[in-house]
Amino acid sequence: MASELLAMANNPCRLTAAVLAACTCLPLIASACVRDEPATYLPRAGTWTYAEQSVVRNSCDDSLLPDPLMTVAIDDPVDDQFQIEVGTKDVICEIDGTEFYCGDYLAFSGGVDGFDATVQIVVTWDGEFSSSTEADGNELTSITCTGEDCNLLKDLPCSRDATFTAEFFN
């Protein structure tokens, strides 16, 4: 490899051709990985019902998981994004065509009394809108622990992946 690079450096025509090829191909490769379609359906603002459909995978003790959502509030649907209100926190979601992805939502972070252990529960949602009032997708919940005593919590880290449906309510 080094000898090939040295040969190219000594031959300006080959080096120029290699640089041009890289400059021409890289934008094509990068654009193939980035999809940015306008939102096909912009979700209606308001209250949505949320129903878990099935558990795809679960390595967590169910007693560690937060209670499932029953309703969510969608705010500020504009252009290619919307916000989900979860308690006092907002989660920003991006829309690409019919698909959406919501950033990490820190559902819980706290220490375990008497131990050097901090547990975090992070939830993400992604899915697809079939209209401006209906969606389905996946909810991924990840539970992690940091600290010297985390080895005492035998079931961590763990994760749970479940499918859901959501419908505009009012």
Image (spheres, rainbow, N blue to C red):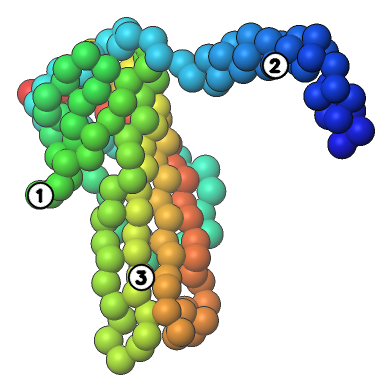
Q: Does residue 92 appear left or right of residue 59 in this picture?
A: left
Pair 1/2: label in front:
2
**The residue tagged with tag 3: helix, strand or loop?**
strand
Instruction: Reply above or below: 48 against 99.
Output: below
Circle 1 Cα neighbour tier, 10 Å, few/some/many (<14 / 14–19 / ≥20): few
For the C terminus, which image quadrant?
A: top left
Residue type at tag 2:
Val
Question: Which of the two labelled residues, at mark 1 and mark 3, occupies the earlier sequence position?
Answer: 1
Q: Could one spot residue 22 in this view of the protein?
A: yes
Residue topped by disc 2: 19
Name the one closer to the observer, 118 or 140: 118
Residue at image coords 16%, 41%: 90
> Percent from the top left, x then y, of residue 93?
28, 30
The quarter of the rendered structure image containing the N terminus is top right
Rendered position, 31 above or below 74: above
* Distance (Cα) linking label 1 and label 2: 51 Å
**Mark 1 lies on residue:** 88
The answer for how far apart the CA atoms under marks 1 and 3 are is 20 Å
Q: Quadrant of residue 53?
A: top left
Q: From this viewpoint, is residue 136 visible? A: no
* Residue that badge 3 annotates: 119
Amino acid of disc 3? Val
Query: Is residue 26 rendered to the left or right of residue 109?
Result: right
Report crowding for label 3: few under 14, some 14 to 19, many 20 or more residues within 10 A (C-alpha).
Answer: some
Label 1 with label 2: CB-CB less than 8 Å? no
Which numbered disc, 2 or 3, marks the residue that appears first in the sequence?
A: 2
Looking at the image, residue 105 lies above or below residue 19: below
